[in-house]
Amino acid sequence: MPVPMLDLKAQYQTVKDEVLTRMMSVIERQHFIMGSEIAEFEKAIAELSHVRNAVSCASGTDAILLPVRALNLVPGDEVIAPAFTFFATAGAIHNGGGKPVFVDIDAGTFNVDPDAIARAITPRTRAIVVVDLYGQMAALERILPLAEEHGIAVIEDGAQAIGARRKINGTWRMAGELPTVGTFSFFPSKNLGGWGDGGMMTTQDDALAERLKRLRLHGGAKQYHHEEVGLNSRLDTLQAAILLAKLPHLAGWSAGRRARAARYDEAFAGFAPVRIPLTDPANEHIFHQYTVRVERRDELRTFLQGRGIGCMVYYPIALHLQPCFADLGYRMGSLPVTEQAMEEVISLPIYPELTDAQQDEVIGAVREFYG
Ligand SMILES: *Cc1c(COP(=O)(O)O)cnc(C)c1O
């Protein structure tokens, strides 16, 4: 039985009526740009993330770019980020005028190593972008004090972690709640996916929220008045309508993902060729991806693909080794933990609609490969 890496059609069947009803309301009103659903959705995400302000934008990439733009970087200003992440994290730093400074990750969680951040801070450091990779939050309680000590901003790239939380000093803190700016993506394959592109920024800082709102609308709060040059980066009203209809399901979907992760954990526990992912005990993980480390990764990948079983390598080439960043001077060996991860990781199908039978097929195929 083939098992897709992700089955958006299965989810579509479960939410179709609610989503189409909300979309039709926008269509009947013909209010496609900044319709009332935008403010309604921003309010809903602000509540979910325990923040004073949520500002929507056109993509998860722009959600990082806009706060980087708000830093007013000058050439040579540095922004620290992990190299083991989706390209957008560093692309946004570059496009916002910053010089990415790549640091290594923690071998267990795949999240950025706070000690590596501490070592990378220089007088030119203006911000740190942390990523909540695969759906569990980074160790913000160690990173935020560093940033505060040096007077630099923290952008939390939560594209894979909407609704995830972490217990910090005895209190549950949501992804996007604590940093200078938190960011989310509504790319269709994300845990809360639209039917197109979309993004969101969260912040407790009211003045910064106003600035981000200007920057997403050509730099002008008032039409035809431009205090600065911004972007055209609005969330589409139709996407907001779709996401509003889907949002009430998010907590249940995340629980479904956790249940499937627990099932994989159990199936591979004690099975030497497969090392199951580590969840930091402080985290409530939302398993955007279930990513294991394996022996002979590329052979396993070919084997699973031959069986029609979806699998992906996130990420096969870390960002410090990308040709576009060659002039930054990194080479193989610069970030050893990252480089080992990019050679060993493979992500297996995980989504709320994945059936036990489908999951057993994946587990069986992996076990069969290793004999
Ligand atoms: C998906 C993703 C982004 C970018 O989001 P888009 O909506 O595709 O622009 C940024 N960072 C990470 C870690 C992501 O997974």
Image: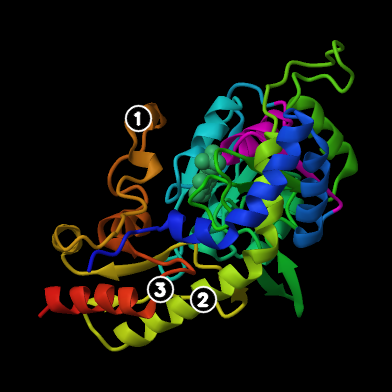
- Whether the residue carrying mark 2 lies under 8 Å from ligand 1 is answered with no
Query: Which numbered disc flags the more N-terminal residue, 1 or 2?
Result: 2
Query: Which numbered disc flags the more N-terminal residue, 2 or 3?
Result: 2
Q: Which residue lies furthest to the top in this view?
A: 224
Query: Which numbered disc flags the more N-terminal residue, 1 or 3?
Result: 3
Q: Which amino acid does label 3 sit on?
A: Pro
Name the mark nearer the viewer: 2 or 3.
2
At 36% from the left edge and 76% from the top edge, which residue is drawn?
A: 276
At 14% from the left edge and 62% from the top edge, which residue is drawn?
A: 303
Counting from the top left corner in percent of width and height, residue 281 is at 57, 80
How many other residues sit within 10 Å of disc 3, few (<14), some (14-19) or many (≥20)?
Answer: some
Left or right of residue 54: residue 310: left
Q: Give the Cα distance between marks 2 and 3.
A: 12 Å
Span of residues in magenta: 52-72
Q: Give the Cα distance between marks 1 and 2.
A: 38 Å
Q: Where on the picture, by quarter, is residue 6?
A: bottom left
Residue 253 among magenta residues: no
* Residue at the spot of label 3: 277
Q: Which amino acid does label 2 sit on?
A: Arg
Asked whether disc 1 touches disc 3, contact meaning CB atoms under 8 Å apart, the reply is no
Name the mark nearer the viewer: 1 or 2.
2
Q: Give the Cα distance between marks 1 and 3.
A: 31 Å
Relative depth, front residue between 249 and 136: 249
Check residue 326 in the rendering and tell me which mark sits there, or answer none. Answer: 1
Counting from the top left corner in percent of width and height, residue 344 is at 27, 62
How many other residues sit within 10 Å of disc 2, few (<14), some (14-19) or many (≥20)?
Answer: many
Q: Can residue 58 be seen in this view?
A: yes
Left or right of residue 186: residue 264: left
Left or right of residue 148: residue 239: left
